[in-house]
Amino acid sequence: MSVAGLRVAYGGADVVHGIDVEVPSGPYGVGLIGESGSGKTTIARALLKLHPVSAGSVTFDGTDVLSMRGSSLSQYRRDVQMVFQDGDGALDPRMSVFSTVSEPFVVHRTVPRAQRRERVAELLDEVGLPIDVIGRYPHQLSGGMRQRVVIARALALTPRLLVLDEPTSALDVTVQERVLQLIERLRDERGLAYLLISHNLAVVDRLCESSIVLYRGQVMERGSTATLLSRPLHPYTRALRSAVPEIGVTRPPLTRISTGSSTSGRSTGCAYAERCPIAVERCRVEPPSLRVVEGRDVACHRAEDSDDLALTVHPLVDRTDL
Amino acid sequence: MIQVRDLRIQYGDRVVAHVPELDLEPGTVTGIAGESGSGKSQTALALMGLSSYAGATVTGSITLDGVELTTKSPKQWRQIRGRRIAMIMQSPRAALNPTLKLGVLFSRTLRLHGVTRSEVGERMRSALDEVVLSGDILDRYPHQVSGGQAQRFAIALVSALRAEVVIADEPTSALDVTVQSEVIEVLRELRDRHGTAMLFISHDLAVISELADSVTVMRQGVVVEQGPTSEVLGSPREEYTRALLAAVPIIGKGGQS
């Protein structure tokens, strides 16, 4: 999948400001990293054609996705599947596991009725669920099991690309670990490509070869995940990196930043300037564009100066007005 | 400050949590780690005197400065809950009355707990300052603030109440990592500034390691391992603690590189 200059608006205001995303053929994972409000879920929804796109192009296998209709759209909907954060909200409480997982077969008429049970059993086995859950309803399953059911349904049409929106954020760490292992295995065994949306860098590090860091609908930094995380250059990537709690690592206290008069309208410059501990006047007036520094793309005027900034600095900001 | 001895919480015959020993001391954070069903939230409810409202029976002893709490009447508990022992919930917005502006909610809560009218304004100001929130937030309704702001507001509330004991049940689990680190920082400052005794509950040992001086690992209602955080996480004795530790995702651990 190839996305260029994607813009998405809500109620007239752009929330995604022209971003490019490349997802190669699988097995391959691309991470979309950012906090609430960074536009990552909006991007996912736009790619799935669940939200209109105001500008830019999306192609899948070289075919324009945005103009797809009829049978090509139907094929696209088989090829690209989404897994939502909340396994609870993504499942119909009135449908059993069997009905849920076999529904794509019915809708897309891919598997005849007589074979559906066998196919569902295979899918449940593939995602590590015992066969006896087949007759159960969502409320009879744990959070981790529900998320596996959602993944099984997403796999039903043998997709080539999965869009995973915070697939483990609602889970306990031990359950998260098992779901991460499942995603890894599916990538390797099925040769799947995926776009993984997460605010958790450790999860992205585990599952994604390359990553894109978003802030307010703009790309701050992108490149190979290992490069970004071992030596983040953008102050925002650094802030995210240092926010991941690690056992045995004591973090110094956060720096406090007064946002002062930032209520007086958005600055014309860098979107991150208001939170940035190393922002200078230029950052507030001139938006930085992406440029190559040390083998990755970074949108920061001060990318070369980021050694001024200890890796551990994460700004604690009064964000009442943000 | 708080001493828990042989605490058993049960629904009918089923014991959902058994805590032989747990101490909360001023200026220290005691962590409880465990998954869903470990009994960690049940323990929190018991410390807040709320178990009976959930239909549970509590036996054993919980004392606050030597005074037994398990035998307190609901009326007596109202003098303790909020004022001396306060709680911070997982979903801060859900814990705030949606029909009240935060300023009204804040001042009413303080008044209810005996803060004089003339003192309320100053208490609110200094507490908001502690958690790095501006006064504008007082004009907003809970749905108009972010999850991180709501959680910092909740912390300002317990700070302004001068609660000696704070029970924080998964206070960062619903938040983004950066916001999580802000909330942890604010809790750490609360402990240091006011000498608060804090119980910090989480399923994530990495989060616990950020803040807790000691940790109690629970599983299915049973205490599995207990001790200073550095010892328990540095050289865990129990298989289950090791499994919890192994589940913490770590950058650079691999998969890819």
Image (cartoon, rainbow, N blue to C red):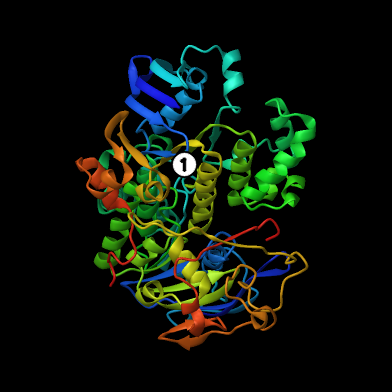
Is B154 placed left or right of A12 in the picture? left
Q: Nearer the viewer, residue A117 or B159?
A: B159
Q: Residue at x 71, y 37 (%)?
A: B106
Q: Specify whether residue A169 is in view.
A: yes
Q: Quadrant of residue A229?
A: bottom left
- For mark 1, what is the residue? B170
Callout 1: chain? B
Kind of residue sitting beneath label 1: Glu
Q: Is residue A244 above or below residue A223?
A: above
Q: Depth check: A41 or B108 in front?
A: B108
Task: Tell me where residue A224 sits by quadrant.
Answer: bottom left
**Is residue B149 positioned above or below B2 on the image?**
below
Q: How many marks?
A: 1
Where is residue A256 drawn, in percent x and y?
59, 61
Q: Quadrant of the N terminus of chain B?
A: top left
At a point 31% along the width and 34% down the height, the residue shown is: B218
B57 versus A228 height, above or below: above
**Residue A119 in view (yes/no):** no
Local packing at callout 1 (Cα closer than 10 Å; few below 14, some 14-19, many 20+) is many
Question: Quarter-wise, where is residue B92 in the image?
Answer: top right
Q: Measuring from the top left, give residue B198's x and y in whole percent.
A: 47, 37
Q: Which residue is at the far bottom?
A: A292
Could you tell me which residue is drawn at 45 percent across and 57 percent down? Answer: A166
**Residue A66 drawn at (x, y percent):** 56, 75
Is disc 1 placed on a helix, strand or loop? Answer: loop
Q: Quadrant of the C terminus of chain B?
A: bottom left
| Viewer-side residue, A115 vs B19 | B19
Q: Is residue A103 above or below residue B32?
A: below
